[in-house]
Amino acid sequence: MRPPVYSTSVSFHRLFNAVNITQPIFREWKTQLPFIQPCYSVSDASSRSIISVMRENRIPMICANPRQVSFVGDDSLVIENNRFGRNEYIVRNMNDLVSAPTGSPPLWIHTTISHDGIIQTREMFEYIWAHKHILNGIVFDVRNFSDTKGVIKPSMYSYKIAIDYLFRNIIHPFEKEYGIHTPSIMIDGREHITRIEHLNELRYYAFDCATTAVQICKKNKMELHLIVGSLIDSYPA
């Protein structure tokens, strides 16, 4: 795979093109999903001009390694996957969580919409409670909604099922048990939300049908986030 473009400058032409490319996406986003905050996943397809647009609009960026963090810049809103410092971090299991030092930045717990996911997330909630870590929110995807061979892909309705599942089995019961409020829910849509029309489909199938979840988020001052990558990198297709 080719590395990100680490040019030290961004030409006006490239930046202008990046703005023109992202404007229709975020215009549609604001129309269809005004209650969801976008997050951008940095990858090998990321360009310096797109990163500049994300920074200008203060859109948080998900980085998988220190090289990507260096690419987006220290003054960007960064959420990382694999090391601890002054940024926010996504932890996927107890090994990730145990390596977090006391007083580390706010953590995101990645969970699976499954019975095993509940068990693992409970362990992480218990650890967060015992070690006084700060919980920023819960991250999930719907990859396990596909068939075992990956032929049948998850539907947009899977997101409604997943969010309802989170409230019913993790967010509400764990708040009662541990006294830990979940400030945010982050949907990892990198593999599924890849075309601009998917934003409309997500609203129609997941959130028009799940107004209760949206109302609960507003009532409890919870934020909703959506991670995308190729939606921006490959637009227009």
Image (tube, rainbow, N blue to C red):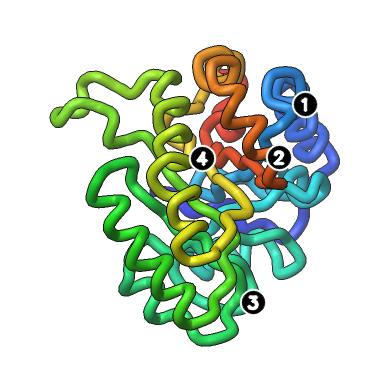
Residue at which label 4 appears? 187
Amino acid type of disc 3?
Arg
Spatial CA distance of label 4 from label 1 is: 22 Å
Spatial CA distance of label 2 from label 4 is: 19 Å
Q: Residues within 10 Å of mark 4 (few under 14, many from 20)?
A: many
Spatial CA distance of label 2 from label 3 is: 30 Å
Which is closer to the viewer, label 2 or label 4?
A: 2
> Do tag 2 and tag 4 residues touch (Cβ < 8 Å)?
no
Which is closer to the viewer, label 4 or label 1?
A: 4
Residue at which label 1 appears? 23
Residue at which label 3 appears? 86
Residue at which label 2 appears? 219
The structure residue drawn at horizontal position 51% and vertical position 57%, both measured from the top left corner, is 175
Amino acid type of disc 4?
Ile
Spatial CA distance of label 3 from label 4 is: 23 Å
Q: Residue furthest left?
A: 149
Q: Position of residue 32 (x, y in %)?
A: 69, 19
The structure residue drawn at horizontal position 30% and vertical position 22%, both measured from the top left corner, is 153
Q: Residue furthest front?
A: 176
